[in-house]
Amino acid sequence: MALPSKIIVTRFSAMGDVAMVASVLKEFAKQYPTVSIIMVSRPLFQAFFEGIPNIKFHSFYPKEKHKGLKGIIALKKELALEDADAVADLHFNLRSRILSTLLKFSGLQVKQLDKGRKEKKELTRFPNKILKPLKPTVERYADVFRQLGFQFVLQNKLIPNQLPLPNLAHALFANDQSKKIGIAPFAQHPYKVFPLAKMQEVIRYLSHNNVDVYVFGGGKTEQTQAEKWQVLYPNVHSTIGRFKLKEELSIISNLDLMISMDSSGMHMASLMGVRCLSIWGATHPFAGFLGYGQTLSDCIQVEHPNRPNSVYGNKSCSCDGTEAIDLVSSEMVITSINQII
């Protein structure tokens, strides 16, 4: 059977997952340069796929024209015009499954993500936890293409992709004698966020040791916090609310190092080929969400029999009365940074 020549790829959310898909598609485009991809995701995430050959981005509007069953049917009709011959469902949620079914009825070959729910439940349960590394999520994404017949091998290596700085960022990089470190200190769930007082200690240390610090991620509340650090310490720059996602990626591509929670900041660094120190609490890199090309040795964590208690970090993980993320100290983070820079 001939390999598909045009594939519809679906991954609607979340930001980190979509960034991981982009890393996988960059590899796929190198190995199969004649295959076209229609990437279906939220318009915000289009920046992740810019510069990848043979990708056409198709925006998904879940609260507007693609809302509900009627909206999914409308999306199917839009995608039918692309004349694709296969679907790689890298989300496998209710919306993507309905869409895949509709496209399958139209004659497209459909393959879907295996999320490994059973193994993840065994990893996070207590007692009788089975603590072992699970298949990386990027490999699960690649498996879907393998099911379509492609002999797809992920290199899982960081490939630097330095981009021109946005005009407004040139002044932030004016000191060519300093190291440039990005920090993405926030996350969707509080149990994944390194205590801000400890992060402030890290920022203060870096600021006074010839490091320019760039703070990424979040909304108004996080912006306020980042701007406080910017006022308190020299060489600290908040990017929040100042740059679009595409511009943030360009800034990240010019960093010497990123520091992130188990969050999208790590996956954005991977996409730009930048090494990342990641801090883990309620979650664990064994669940498969370590950034593409990043290493386990760059994960900062304290092992405890209660960890991990969830895959997504949406539940408190008490370790003998201490939240798991609180087990990590600012000294541990600073020591890890100094071993690199």
Image (cartoon, rainbow, N blue to C red):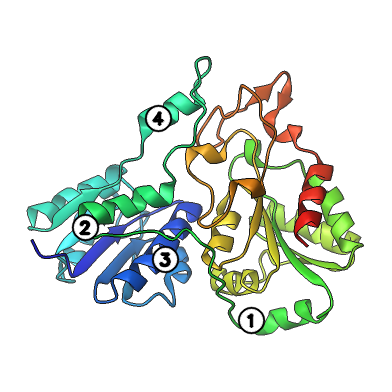
| Distance between the alpha carbons at the discs numbered 2 and 4 | 26 Å
What amino acid is found at the position of numbered circle 3 in the picture?
Answer: Pro
- Asked whether 99 or 39 is in front, the reply is 39
Residue 247 image position (x, y, % from top left): 59, 74
Instruction: Give residue 139's mark.
Output: none
| Distance between the alpha carbons at the discs numbered 1 and 4 | 43 Å
Q: Residue furthest top?
A: 127
Q: Which residue is mark 1?
A: 166
Q: Image quarter for residue 22?
A: bottom left
Q: Which residue is mark 3?
A: 43
Q: Which residue is mark 4?
A: 119
Q: Image quarter for residue 120?
A: top left
- Asked whether 336 or 249 is in front, the reply is 336
Residue 236 visible in the current orientation: no
Query: Tag 1's secondary structure?
Result: loop
- Asked whether 315 or 271 is in front, the reply is 271
Residue 298 image position (x, y, % from top left): 66, 49
| Distance between the alpha carbons at the discs numbered 3 and 4 | 32 Å
Question: Considering only order in the chain, which callout, 3 or 1, is on the residue closer to the N terminus?
Answer: 3
Question: Considering only order in the chain, which callout, 4 or 3, is on the residue closer to the N terminus?
Answer: 3
Question: Considering only order in the chain, which callout, 3 or 2, is on the residue closer to the N terminus?
Answer: 3
Residue 210 visible in the current orientation: yes
Q: Nearer the viewer, mark 1 or mark 2?
A: 2
Is there a contact, CB below 8 Å, between mark 1 and mark 3?
no
Q: Which residue is mark 2?
A: 87
Question: Considering only order in the chain, which callout, 4 or 2, is on the residue closer to the N terminus?
Answer: 2
